[in-house]
Image (spheres, rainbow, N blue to C red):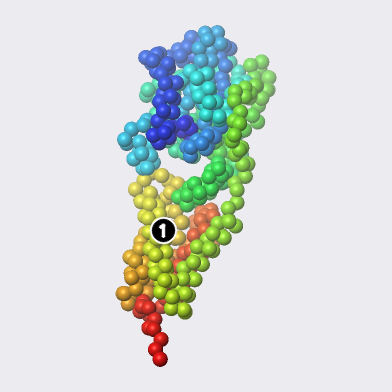
Amino acid sequence: MPSTDRSIRPSRLLTAALLLLLALPALGQGGRTPPWGAGQSRAEDLDLTYALFGPGDDVASWWGHAALGVEDERLNVSRLYSYGNFSFDEQMLARYAMGRLEFWVADAPVMPYLRFYARADRDVRVLHLNLSPQARARLAQHLADNVLPGNRDYLYDHYRDNCSTRLRDAVDVGLDGRLRAHLSTPGRMTLREHTRRYTAVNPAMSLLLDLAMNDTIDQPLTRWDEMFLPDELERAMLELEVIGADGKPAPLIRDIDRFHTASARAPTPEEPPSYVPALLAIGLLLGGVPLLLSLGWRQRGLGWCRVALGAFTLFTGLVFGLVGVLLTVMWAFTDHTVVFRNENLFLVNPLWLGAVWLGASLMRGKHPRTPARLRGLGLLLGGLSLLGVALKVLPAFDQNNWNILALLLPPVLGYAAAWVRLGPVVAREPAPATT
């Protein structure tokens, strides 16, 4: 994941500048290779560490961040290697929207980097790796090579190629493949379930991410795949035994320095929260409103019910239609593979934009064909939503979108039923009673 203090909001630009300043001492060397990359360090003098930074306040920081440190204790030289760097420019948003955002690894002084995250009141833990001299030299050389201009850039993918997976791969190089072998077992949960855990701090944002992502994040994982999370990589390294400096089996992590413990942050839940009951209650409420308004108009002749139903129809059509357009555009024109072929399009799709014009027409109450057109649109949208549910019996339609179904299926069916009840009658106020 990206370094958690790299938001593009103006209020966070100072944060970005500070992070850049942390890296300036390394950049100011004019490309000078560190002693472990130039063959000047002795393997037995190297100390390799895994620095873990807990979740922060911004969306990008909810996942935490991590880096690998190298110190030559004899030469008193140390560097921290972070793969969470990207540029702030006018094209950054466009690249990110298209799924083509380039990140790079950079090295920076260790202590200023740690203190920066501590000042943000984020957990900071430094894990010292218990590696043989050969493994230390191999991992240090790998990091020194990665930071070179020709090697440092990579195409960011939140789940498959981020700051944590790059560290996982580097540690595996140092361990000569032992980490990957250890993590070849089935994972604890899917990518979606992990996402729900880490976004539990903001249920609304969690729901939006759930809406946007398809079934590629619902497939079975190995533990190796779960290492896109810095906490999961820490968990794996704490379990692993290696051949230590004395040639005997020993824990990979020989010591933990708890540099800072956050004072005001709840821990990330171990299991994803369940929102289905609450979302279903909200969905039933949203679906009941158009039904009640249609009954008020058709059975009691209340003109304000027609106007209100038209207004709700217009607003819902605009929101659902624009969301459907966005999901369609992301599928058709971006490289974000997690948004392709999204089953939520059965519920929210561009067809809903037709309800905008028809809702406005229903509010005016002057066009005799509006109720019939709404009836046809309701049958189409309601039928599509039910088709999306029915297709879930097939293996190809295995998206875990029950949260979205609980929230959106009732209002889709509620509007469909309300529009169908309008029937083919002319939309006009009932004539006043005469004597």
Q: Is residue 364 above or below residue 221?
A: below
Q: Residue visible at 60% across and 57% down?
A: 277
Q: Residue visible at 46% across and 64% down?
A: 412
- Percent position of residue 258, x then y: 62, 24
Numbered marks: total: 1
Name the one closer to the observer, 113 or 316.
316
Q: Quarter of the image containing the C terminus?
A: bottom left
Q: Residue furthest bottom?
A: 435
Name the one closer to the observer, 82 or 205.
205
- For the residue labelled by badge 1, is the local secondary structure a helix, a strand or a loop? helix
Residue 78 in view here: yes
- Percent position of residue 8, x then y: 40, 35
In which image quadrant can residue 294 be found?
A: bottom left
Q: Residue visible at 67% across and 23% down?
A: 250
Residue 328 in view here: no
- Percent position of residue 375, x then y: 40, 73
Residue type highlighted by circle 1:
Phe
Q: Residues within 10 Å of mark 1 (few under 14, many from 20)?
A: many
Name the one closer to the observer, 421 or 429.
429
Q: Residue furthest front?
A: 435
In which image quadrant can residue 317 be found?
A: bottom left
Residue at label 1? 320
User: Image check: 233 left or right of 385?
Assistant: right
Q: Residue visible at 53% across and 63% down?
A: 285
User: Image check: 46 left or right of 317?
Assistant: right
